[in-house]
Amino acid sequence: MNRLKYIIDRSTGIETVSYEDVDISYPEHTHIGHCVLGIVTKGEVGVKIGDKEYVCHEDEYFSIALNVPHSIYPISKCYSMISICIPKEDINKKELDIIKEKIVGNPQMELSIADMSEQVHISSYHMIRKFASENGLTPHKFQLQCRIRKAKELLLDGMKVADVAAAVGFCDQSHLCRVFKKQLGISPDQYIKSAILSNEEK
């Protein structure tokens, strides 16, 4: 049985995730507001960071910087791990930041490739390639990732799953649940039950 705990300190923005005997895989994604330190406490975990792959054994660690595409998957049947997400500001300005910031700030918006390309005055083909080069993901995958991150915030604020789906731009609750499970390995309801808020700001 997968056992997770999300410990979210809203006063510092630090999020700690405790995994105990899980077999969860995370598809390729990036972190736009924090870097990550992962410590394997049991079993073996495969980590692909950029174009390099590693196997982390018990008592070994890995670190992931901002905007670097990565994926995580079990090598052993199950694993235990502690992951610490530490807020960090990206000070490196990039050409397509205007698009990135619009997606991050308004993940629910329907932004077509044509619209994004027109904003930066390059072809759709080159815009997609350049965006992926700067941010590690295509605009579509990046937007889905931002929608799930916003969904996590709204779920912890007590919003119902169906209302969260509409608020972050998914066509219905089942669409949100499918993408949520694919990205996080658990359902929205499981996420709510596994989350612990500490030092919550009033």
Image (spheres, rainbow, N blue to C red):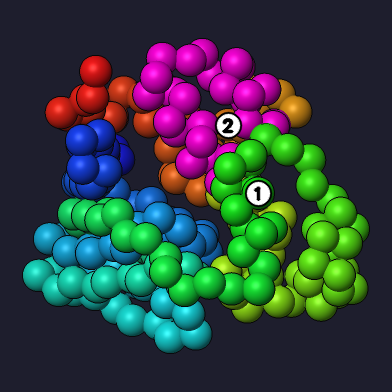
Expressed as whole percent of the image width and height from the top left, the position of residue 164 reads: 57, 22
* Three-letter amino acid code of the residue under disc 1: Lys
Expressed as whole percent of the image width and height from the top left, the position of residue 44 reads: 24, 69
Residue at numbered disc 1: 102
Are circles 1 and 2 on residues that touch, CB within 8 Å? Answer: no
Quarter of the image holding residue 46? bottom left
Q: How many marks?
A: 2
Foreground of the two, 45 or 69: 69
Vertical relation: 114 (above or below) 173 = below
Which residues are the magenta region? Answer: 146-170
Element type where label 1 sits in the image: helix
Expressed as whole percent of the image width and height from the top left, the position of residue 79 reads: 23, 57
- Give the prevailing secondary structure in the magenta stretch: helix
Vertical relation: 135 (above or below) 108 = below
Classify residue 193 as left or right of residue 144: left
Residue 163: mark in rendering = none
**Callout 2: 10 Å neighbours few (<14), some, many (20+)?**
many
Disc on the earlier residue, 1 or 2: 1
Q: Is residue 168 magenta?
A: yes
Q: Is residue 95 magenta?
A: no
